Image (tube, grey):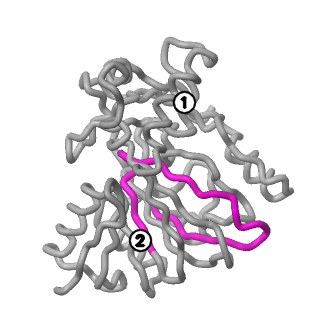
Amino acid sequence: MSGFDIRKTGGRIGAEVIGIDLSTELSEPVFAQIHQAFLEYKVLFFRDQDITDADQLAFAGRFGPLTQKHPMMRTLDGSPQVIPVDGEEQRANHWHTDISFTRAPSLGTTLRSVVLPPYGGNTLVANGAAGYKDLPAELREIADRLWAVHTNHAEQPRLGTERGEEVRRAFLARRFEAAHPVVRVHPESGEPSLFLGGFAQRLVGMELRESRPLIDVLQSYVRRPENVARWTWRPGDVLIFDNRSTQHYAPNDYDGHKRVLHRVSINGDVPVGLDGKSSYVIQEGE
């Protein structure tokens, strides 16, 4: 395949890949360029795709082994690697990094539009590496030494519906906790990044009341508007973000309309901090 283009959508994060058909098998040279752009721009967007779940699985699988089943979320019957992200069941309107409450969070996540509301329902992706670069030197020195406890028992929004509460109870039925470095070193690019999000509940060695203000200050650098890409979905859209250096947010701004995306994730590795130490499990599914 030739003639495709990769165009930045913002100065610090995001690029649109034009002229690629994800229903076909990408050649090694083409995929190498896409993979390099994935590392550089953190999130890639593809318009006008006519693909199936099988095509989405094949594309995501080029980045690494796929996550077999989410520990709590519903998957499609017969396709345990595909999660239907249904606004009638959950609306993750908070910044988070996928399954960061486990020792080895996802490498990345692909999303494909299936049913879209007439307005709203955008996806926001924030660049944690840019947030780290923005830190004043004095604050960066503090962040470099911090570790955070991530848990699924943090910032789980309520829909106020019977189905929503049922899904929320299932998500919280077992407790997962893992400790990660606040500054994570990307395993491929070597780039340091703030690794936080809504599942980061407290800092290791500190109480919740001591942790919250510092976490909020660090988070504010990641969420700066210039560090955020906002994608307005259209039918046929696909995106993939690097979960190792981003956070994402799905605003609950589409009222009672239906919104369904299909999610396929790639297995990740264990985060490592600037000091070379690896993340560890505190509690797993008890």
- The amino acid sitting under disc 2 is Leu
Outermost residue on the left side: it is: 29
**Could you tell me if the residues under marks 1 and 2 are in contact, i.e. CB atoms within 8 Å?**
no
Whole-percent x, y for residue 19 in the image:
29, 85
What span is in magenta? 238-264
Above or below — where is 143 with respect to 258?
above
Is 258 contained in the magenta span? yes
Provide the residue designation for mark 1: 216
| Residue appearing at x 65%, y 35% in the figure | 153
Residue 261 appears left or right of 231: right
- The amino acid sitting under disc 1 is Asp
Is 115 contained in the magenta span? no
Above or below — where is 207 with respect to 217?
above
* Mark 1 surroundings within 10 Å by alpha-carbon count, few (fewer than 14), some (14 through 19), many (20 or more): few
Q: Give me the disc on residue 57.
A: 2
Whole-percent x, y for residue 109 in the image:
43, 59
Residue 7 appears left or right of 110: left
- Say which quadrant the C terminus sits in: top right
Above or below — where is 50 with respect to 246?
below
